[in-house]
Amino acid sequence: MQTISSVRGLAGAGLLALGLAVATPATALTVYSAGPAPLIDALAAGFTKLSGEPVSVFQGTTGKVFARLEAEAANPQADIVISASWDSAVDLDQRGWLMPYTSPNAASVSDAYKAPTYVAQGLSALALVWNTKSGTPRPADWSDLTADAFRDKVNLPDPAQSGTALELLAGLVSAQGDKAWQLMSELRRNGAAVAGANAAALNPVLQGAKAAVFGAVDYVAFGQKAKGEAIEVIFPSSGTVIAPRPMMILKSTAKPEQAKAFIDYVLSGAGQAEVAKVYLIPATADVPAQRPGLADIPLLESASAAQGGTPPATDRATLLREFDKAFGR
Amino acid sequence: MGAHGLRRITIAALLVVVGLPMAMIGMQAVFPEIAAGRLGTPFAALGPVLQDPRLPQLVWNTLKLAAGVVLLSAAIGIPLGVLRGWFRIPMAPLWDLLLLVPFLIPPYIAAMGWILFLQPAGYWQQLTGWHAGGFLFSFPGVVFVMTLNVFPVVYFAVSRGVASAGGRLADVARVCGAPPWQALWRITLPLAAPAMAASLLLAFAMSIEEYGTPAVLAANAGFFVLVTGIESRLSEWPIDLPGAAVMSLILVALALTVFSLQRRLLRGRDFETIGGKPAAAAQRELGAWRWPVLLIFAIVVALATLAPLFAIAATAFSRTLSGGLAAGNLGLDHFRAIFTEGSAALRAFGLSIGLGLAAALLAGILGAAVAYVASRPAQRGGRWLDALSALPNTLPGVVVAVGLILLWNQPFLPFTPYNTVAILLLAYVCLLLPYPVRYSQAALRQVAGNLEAAARVHGAGVYRALWSIVLPLIWPSVLAAMVLVFAVASRELVASLLLAPAGLQTVSVFVWRQFEQGSVGQGMAVSLLTILATGGLILAALHTLRRLQRT
């Protein structure tokens, strides 16, 4: 039975490793955040350094963050939630889950990106991402992707899986009406593919399987470009939408003061500098962006585009149904 | 404490690990507001889900996919397993290791690897000028990629079953004048039937439950299945827990139907082959057939193991994806980034290995106990235990995760594993319990009950008889299952994404976050290191296993 004892030894080592891994202080301020991971890690570390308050982070997609919030509803664990979807904050606010707080540091945040119970951490915009080595002409507007040169070469993130893609669709429809649906039909005729969430749509463009993404989240692409990928991030001339990333304090928090201090920190110069570092547009006007700022991005002329918000849930279902129809899904 | 004690402990453990989380999912399906601690509006979620016009299509696609994967897995895994178990294959341990690698590669990584490999402008086109994007993003493509992940479960079970089933009985047949092929066909294969059936059932459950491949590939193919529907209800705003629970129950119903079918097929037969002193099964020589057989193994390994590994390694060692396969684009940048970015990747790695080992040990013990308790004919309710232990295999990881949160996040609990690393361990043991149960069961079916009875007659207690007689006889199968549990648990993604306690991440979660940020190269670099490390650990375990078989 020598083998059994050696297996026992291995398992013992495993349990020991587990024990060592459990080092999270139970009393830490708990933040549930949508990506990017390096940003929330840096913000948590910066806040702990400043205040001495430990922060423990759960990071996932907006969907995972909210699935966890819903499943935990009987006994909420999070103090602060940072989401990539403005609607999710509006929704939680309507359900009365949020604690009102206006940070003094939010003074220079544009009114469009704050409300009594939530405020933007940073902003992203939706863009065309184009592979410069793809042998296709540089597109300047959304409709350029319906040209023959882009036949079978365009990816769209699925608006059912990507909140930002849905916001773009809503923005286009509310600004252009039927013309937007016509654009979708032409894209489909040109062989455009609906390809999963944001990352799934972008990766094939990096390798060159596709030439462009219609409506990619810009900061991820700027990050890839900085790493040397042969891509260009283009803001279409007819305009795009801004996707603000709301952060909010849950009413159920046992640590309201620390939570408020965390929001203050994220909106401070130091916090917003971290936001800028991952190529998001800082929410406060006084910290410069490391990439084209709000002034350089043409916006669609519609209320929802400037607000970043999407229409209510009933419209969401209609939009998705129409989109599926346009793409024959 | 006698036989009843063991039975009671086993049932209690099974209820805590599997029964209660499953019950919470059932409750969630019936009471939509249970997550908020209320029992209002019962059955409100059933209507909208069951009347969804897309549901029949999702169910049909799920069955179609599972049927395709099971058939193709059987077509590859059974002949290969029979060859491996019946004949002496040159370099057999190497083939075993190489065919275990598909388990070590998380399915979504393998699918991404295939995309990077076969899509237009992918590595294959860069090397040969051809691409197979049309095939990959289609139903046959999804079946192909998924089968390559799943068939090893059939291969290992069949090779083990054939090796132990009736080596001696087949020799008897030979002595009595049967030609070798007849001995194989009439004696060994029928005796290995439980192993085949059990592994095909596992393959079926795996393919209706697996999320990674359909999510990565099928979305492009416009091919949606139940599990992608469930996942979308749990990850797209607005979140729909009750709807996801209802759809999960549909999956469970599908799996239970197939499960009871399998039981009916095997019922009333007797597969006992080990009725006395076990003898080392002498494997037959291949002779001139050696080369064609080796060629078959090489082709399967090239497809299932080398192709995805190549795509993963090529991406990990490329500076940029857009640079392609070019000497100037090669570099260690992604590996350097892992080690300079602080210890996050290494800590994640340690956590995953520790969790994998602990899950293998716990699932191995519990699985063997469940199989034992359920297999003895005198026990009533064995069928229910058996079914309960098979359930998690049919549920998507994300649903099990939700069940665990609903169960363990209740405010009235005096202590809870939730938000500690123990919740991940619970999730892995729950999800992977079917492996050791199936494997032990197949082994137990071949161990005659009179061996144990003989030990009892000679005065050994229940535990003594188990420890000295039954366990040594089924140990190779249990250990093989534990290796599988370790391999899968150390890379589990779907449940980990939702359950990871704040502040902790497993390797798979770490990699997935890299992908989400578009850092495919860095994610692939961590994946490659993890595959190599877990492969090394398993190599050690297989080595032990081999030594064990010789003695």
Image (cartoon, coloured by chain):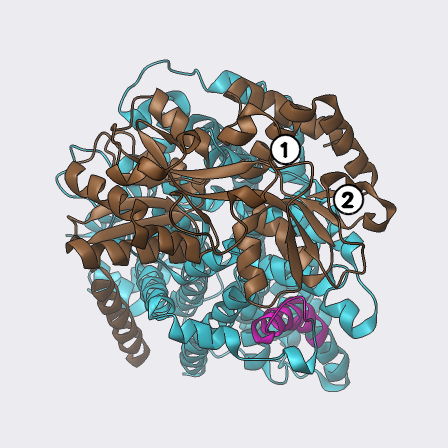
Most frequent secondary structure within the magenta stretch = helix
Horizontal relation, residue A216 to residue B118: left or right: left
Magenta segment: does it hold A189? no
Q: Residue at x 48, y 54 (%)?
A: A279
Within-10-Å neighbours for mark 1: few <14, some 14–19, many 20+: some
Which chain does tag 1 point to? B
What residue does disc 2 label?
Answer: A145
In the depicted structure, whether residue A243 falls above or below residue B116: above
Magenta segment: does it hold B300? yes
What residue does disc 1 label?
Answer: B58
Chain B shade: cyan
Q: Which residues are magenta?
A: B298-323
Secondary structure beneath label 1:
helix
Which chain does tag 2 point to? A
The x and y percentages for residue A48 are 21, 56
Q: Residue at x 68, y 71 (%)?
A: B323
Identify residue type, mark 1: Leu
Identify residue type, mark 2: Leu
Secondary structure beneath label 2:
helix
In the foreground, B286 or A92? A92
Label the brown chain with its letter.
Answer: A
Horizontal relation, residue B354 to residue B431: left or right: left
Q: Real-space Cα distance between discs 2 and 1? A: 32 Å
Within-10-Å neighbours for mark 2: few <14, some 14–19, many 20+: many
The x and y percentages for residue B40 are 32, 15
Q: Which quadrant of the figure contains the C terminus of chain B? A: bottom left
The answer to whether residue A189 is visible is yes
- Is the residue under label 1 in contact with that under label 2 (CB below 8 Å)? no
